[in-house]
Image: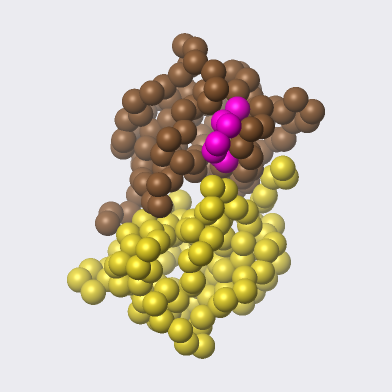
Chain colours: A brown, B yellow
C-alpha cells in the first residue's frame, strides 16, 4: 500500500478526455483526468459516476439543467442520466466509478477509451 | 443531483472521529470526517477503505510501517489490514468505502459510530 499524490500524478500526462487509473477499491476505480472543451452526450445505464474537481471549473450539462463545479466540489451523476461534461478552460478531475465503466457510456466514438493506463 | 462543496460541509461540524455521509454511489459512501489524536487499531475484513486528505496531515500506522499523508494525497487500505489513524493536529479527510463499513471495523468501543449523520 503506497500513498498517491494527486498533483504528482496529474503532472505525468497532458492529454484530454483520457482517464488514468490511480487505484482500485471494492470493485471501484479511482481515476484522474484532464478535460478541455465539450465531451459527448452519454449515460451509464448501470453505474453511478462521481466527478470531484481538483483544479479549474467544470460544467456538467444535463437535458434540463447545468451544474457548475469548482475545485473542492463534487457531483454524483446517477445511473441512466444523460450528461455532457464541458470545460471552457482545462480542468483536472478525480473520478470514482465501477471498474467496468466506459468513459463514453452508451456511446462509442472517437472519444471512447477502452484500455486505460494506470499511473 | 446537487453538487457538494467539501469545505462548506466541513464547516458544519467540529466533532472528531465521527464520519458524516455526503453521498452514495454504487453501494459506496462518500464521507468526510475530522480526526484529532489516536484512533483505535482495527481492520475491515471485507472492505477496502480510502483516505483522502483535504486539510492537514494524517499518519496511518500499520503493524510494520507508517504512511504519512498530506493534503491532496490518498491511501487505499486494503481489506483485512490492521491500521490505526493518528492525527497530531486536526486533519480533515474524505473517505470512500462501502455503505456497510463500520468506522472501528472488527472492534467495538467508545469510538464506534453506528448511525452516521448525512450532511
Looking at the image, residue A38 sits to the left or right of residue B84; the answer is right
Which residue is at the far left?
B64
Q: Give, as a single range, the part of the protein colored magenta.
A: A43-49
Residue B32 lies, in percent from the top left, at 57, 62
Residue B30 lies, in percent from the top left, at 56, 56
Residue B90 visible in the snapshot: no
Q: Quadrant of the N terminus of chain B?
A: top right
Looking at the image, residue A112 sits to the left or right of residue A83; the answer is left
Nearer-the-camera pick, A26 or B93 = A26
Give residue A50's quadrant in the image: top right
Query: Which residue occupies 57% across, 31% down?
Result: A44
Query: Which residue occupies 62% across, 54% down?
Result: B23
Q: Quadrant of the C terminus of chain B?
A: bottom right
Residue B9 on the magenta segment? no
Which residue is at the far right?
A64
Q: Is residue B53 above or below residue A79?
A: below
Q: Is residue A26 above or below residue B56?
A: above
Which residue is at the far bottom?
B110
Give residue B86's quadrant in the image: bottom left
Magenta stretch secondary structure, dominant: loop
Query: Which residue occupies 46% across, 41% down?
Result: A98
Query: Which residue occupies 70% across, 27% down?
Result: A61
Residue A104 lies, in percent from the top left, at 52, 23
Residue A95 visible in the snapshot: yes
Looking at the image, residue A108 sits to the left or right of residue A69; the answer is left
Q: How many marks?
A: 0
Nearer-the-camera pick, A91 or A118 = A118
Amino acid at each position: 500500500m503506497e500513498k498517491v499524490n494527486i498533483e504528482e500524478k496529474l503532472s505525468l500526462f497532458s492529454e484530454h478526455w483520457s482517464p488514468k487509473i490511480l487505484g482500485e477499491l471494492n470493485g471501484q476505480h479511482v481515476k484522474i483526468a484532464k478535460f478541455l472543451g465539450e465531451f459527448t452526450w452519454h449515460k451509464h445505464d448501470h453505474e453511478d459516476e462521481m466527478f470531484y474537481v481538483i483544479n479549474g471549473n467544470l460544467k456538467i450539462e444535463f437535458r434540463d439543467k447545468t451544474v457548475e463545479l469548482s475545485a473542492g466540489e463534487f457531483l454524483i451523476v446517477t445511473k441512466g442520466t444523460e450528461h455532457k461534461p464541458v470545460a471552457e478552460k482545462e480542468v483536472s478531475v478525480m473520478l470514482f466509478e465501477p471498474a467496468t465503466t466506459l468513459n463514453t457510456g452508451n456511446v462509442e466514438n472517437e472519444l471512447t477509451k477502452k484500455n486505460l493506463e494506470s499511473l
